[in-house]
Image (cartoon, helix red, strand yellow):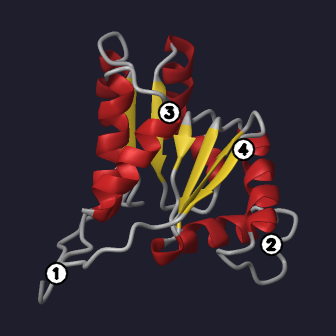
Amino acid sequence: QICRIDYEETFSPEYSRDLMQAARAWLDDYSVFIVSDYDKGCSHHLPDFMAAAREKGARVLVDPKRPDLSHYAGAFLVKPNWKEFVATARFERAPGAEKPISPKDHDAIRVIADYLMQKHDIAHLVVTMGADGFVHAARDGYFAAHPTKAREVFDLSGAGDSFMATLAAQLCRGADLVHAIELGNAAAGI
């Protein structure tokens, strides 16, 4: 890959409302949803959808852009990258976020993740950290750090989307969450 060019636009609150109304209609037919928030305006009305999804028992997987996790409250899983996780920890004034945090400091990551999940009623937090692998924390106390699988990289574009799509597909077929996350990580590496 030599160059990537994105043409982006911001959407109106009305468009967001219409999109979320359409998504709410899908709650009767689907049990897993992916929200990739690029903070371009499509998700103005996301909290209403999140509440409706939770009421229906649907699992919402979020790839966040905003540091304010209240926008994703009640999500089944939120997957920030390292930069987003640190920004969120500071924005939310999580314990330990006032000092520099290292991807290798799993104790600090766990404290921050627990705080964020409890505060915003998020069941799982997966923090992707590039060469440092990823961590998976759950509100029930589960915590695991996974190393990266080193490989020659040709194109980084789409790694996060590949992770989420694979994770969602595995959940839809009934896979165990831990296994689904591991397969998502493998897909991102490819």
Front label number (3 vs 4): 3
Between discs 1 and 2, the one toward the N terminus = 1
Tell me if residue 179 comes above or below residue 155 in the rendering.
above
**Quadrant occupied by the C terminus:** bottom left
Is residue 116 among what the camera can see? yes
Left or right? Give the position of 13 relative to 1.
right
The residue under the point 55% across, 74% down is 83
Marker disc for residue 27: none
* Lower sequence index among marks 1 and 4: 1
On-image quarter of the N terminus: bottom left
Callout 3 touching callout 4 (CB < 8 Å): no
Q: Earlier in the sequence, mark 3 or mark 2?
A: 2
| CB contact under 8 Å: marks 2 and 4 | no
Q: Quick one: 11 or 153, which is closer to the camera?
A: 153
Residue 63 on image: x %, y %: 44, 52
User: Mark 2 = which residue?
Assistant: 97
- Amino acid type at circle 2 is Ala
Residue 70 in picture, x, y percent from top left: 66, 46
Dot 3 lies on which element? helix
Residue type (three-letter) at the residue carrying disc 1? Arg
Q: Which residue is mark 4?
A: 117
Q: Are marks 3 and 2 in contact (CB under 8 Å)?
A: no
Q: Which residue is mark 3?
A: 177
For marks 2 and 4, the one nearer the N-term is 2
Foreground residue among 173 and 25: 173
Vertical comparison of 27 with 141: above or below: above
Instruction: State how far apart marks 1 and 2 are (Cα).
Output: 33 Å
